[in-house]
Amino acid sequence: MNLPGSGILKGLAVTARNFAGSYFEKDRLTTEQYPEERPTLPENARSFPFLIYDGEDPEAGMRCVSCKICEKECPPQCIYIIQDRDEAGKALKRPRVFDIDISVCMSCQICVEVCPFESIRMDQDYELSAYDRFGALVHDKAKLLKSNTYYHRIHPSEAAETDERIEADRKKKEAAAAAKAAVKKEPAKPAEGGQ
Amino acid sequence: MSGLLESAPLALMAWFLGLLGAFGVPAWALEAISALISIGAVIGVFLGLFALASVMERKILARVQNRLGPNRVGPCGLLQPVADGIKMITKEDLVPRGADRVVHFLAPVVMMVPALLVLAILPYGRGMVPAELDAGILFFFAVGAGTEVAVFMAGWGSNNKYSILGAMRAIAQLISYEIPLVMAGVTAAMIAGSLMPSAIVAAQGGFAFGFIPQWFVLTPWGFTAGLIFFIGALAESNRSPFDLPEGESELVAGHLTEYSGFKYATFFMAEYVGMFAICGMLVTLFFGGWQAPLPFLTIVPSWAWFFGKVCAVAFTMIWVRATLPRLRIDHLLAFAWKFLLPMSFAAFFSAACWHFAGRGWAAWLLSLVVVAVPYLAFGSHFSSRFSTSRRTYRFSE
C-alpha cells in the first residue's frame, strides 16, 4: 500500500529537479532568445519566392524572360507580370513589372517548379512584417531580385544542382547549334539520299 | 552591528518622532504620526513583496518548465512589475451595462481592506508589532474572512454567469477551508496558551540541547497542523491547486471575468498581499515567527528571519502551483470535509496529548501516534475513493 500523499511528494520532487536543473544544466533551456540569437534554418526552409540574377547588375543578369508561366500556374494568383517593350513596341525578353503579393502567396512553390529558366526560387527571409498592409506586402521587381550568390548561401545544394543543370543545358544547346551549323554546311541529307 | 540592524527600524522611528517632538508637535499628533509611519512601512513592504512576487512567481514557474521567464524589462526582468503596472493603469476600465455599478466598483476595495488589515497583528520582528492585540489570532481569522464578501460582491455585481458561478465556488471553497485552517491555527494558540501572536512566537523561542529550535512545526502535532494550515492557506488565497474560482478552463476567470484595468490589478494585489499575510501567519504560528533557526544565526536581525521565512513559504506555494493540477470542485470539497477536517481534529487532540504527557520524548511519541493513525486511516480511505488504475472506456476504443 502506498502511503497516502506520496504521489504529491513524488510530483514535488520532479518539479524541484527541473527547477534546480534549469540553473545547472544549460541544455535544459531550449528557449532561443530570438532577436539576439537567430535560428539556423534547415536548408529546405522556405518562405516566399524571389527572382535570381546572375552577375552584379540585377537588371542585366535577370534570368526571367517574362514567359508568364508562373503567373498562369500560381494557384492564388499572386504574381503580376508586364512584359517590357522597346520604343518600337517590340516585346523584350524581360519583365517591366514583376510583383508578388506575399499577403496572398501561400508558399506552394509551384512557380519554382514550372519555371523553365531557373529564375524563380524560394527565399528564407521570414522577417517580412510591415506597417503598410497594402503597399508594403506587394514585393516589386527591385525587392524580389536577389543574386545567385545569395541563392547559393541559403540553399547551397539546390543552387549547385541548378547551376549544373544550366551549364548542361548551355552545353547541349551549343552542341545542338554546332550540329545544326554542320548540317547547314553539308546540304546532302542522308534521309533524302535513301529514296 | 547585529544589535544595530536588529533595532534599526524602531530606532529610526523613535529618532524621527523625537525630532518632531523637539519641534513642538503635540503628543497626540506624535502618536498618530507613529501609527501612520507603521502603516506606511507595512503597506510599503508588502506592496514591494507583491511586486517582487509577481515577477518571481513567473520566473520560478518558468524555471520549473525549463524556460527562462520574463527577462526583457530591466536587469533579469526585475522591472516587469513596473511595466505590468503601467499597462494595468492605462487599460480601459470596463463596467458591463447590466452590472450593479456600486457593488462592482466596491468589490476590489472591500477585497483590499481585509488583506491590509490583517497585516496589523503580525509580529515582524522582536517588538515590531504594528497593533499588539490580545486576540490577534482571532482578529486575523475574523477579518480575513471578509474577503469572502468581496469575492461574492465581485461575482454578484458583475451580472455575468461565469462571475456568479466563480463566486459561488469561491464561497464554498473559502468557507470549507476556513474550518481546518482555524482548527489548525487553534492548536498553536492552545499550546502557547495565548491568542496573542507575539506570545506564540515567544513560546517557540529557545533551543533544545542548545541547537534544536523549539518551533511547533518540529513536533508531530505541529507538523500536521502546519501542513493543514498550509493547505488551507493555499485554498484561502485561491492558489493552485485550489484556484477553482478562477478556473479559466471552465469559468473564463470566475469572479474576475468582468474586471479590467486598475480594478483587476487591485484584486490581484489583494490576493498576493493576502497570500503573504497568511504565509506570515503560518510562520508566526508554526515556524517560530522571527526566531532564528540556530543559536549562532541570531546575529541576523529578527525581521530578516521573518521575511526570509515568509518568502520561503511563498516559494513553496509557487512550487506547489507548478506541480499540482487543479482539483475538481467536488473533490476539493470532499478533501476539505472528509480529510482535512478530521485531520485537524486529530492534530488538535494530538496537541492536547503532547501537552498533558509533559512535552517530553514520551509526549512526542504519543502525539506522533495520535496523528499518524488517523492519517493512515483517513488517507487510505480517502484515496481509495479515487481509482488510480487505468481508465477503461465503454464505447470508444
Image (cartoon, coloured by chain):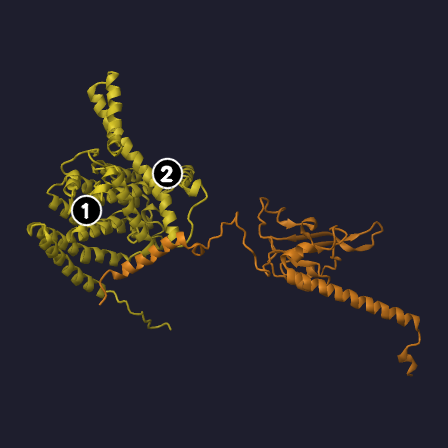
Residue type at tag 2: Phe
Question: What residue would you read off at disc 1?
Answer: B211
Mark in front: 1 vs 2 = 1
Kindly identify the residue that appears in the image at 12 percent across and 41 percent down: B194
- Local crowd size for mark 2, using a 10 Å CA cut-off: few (<14), some (14–19), many (≥20): some
Q: Quadrant of the N terminus of chain A?
A: bottom left
Q: Disc 1 to disc 2, how far (Cα)?
A: 49 Å
> Is residue B183 left or right of B317 when viewed as pictured?
left
Question: What residue would you read off at disc 2?
Answer: B262
The image shows residue B137, relative to residue A89, as above or below, that is above
Can residue B320 be seen here?
Answer: yes
User: Residue A62 or A19: which is nearer the viewer?
Assistant: A19
User: Residue B343 or B78: which is nearer the viewer?
Assistant: B78
Query: What colour is chain B?
Result: yellow
Query: What colour is chain A?
Result: orange
Q: Chain of mark 2?
A: B
Task: Locate residue B160, reporting x and y percent.
Answer: 33, 48
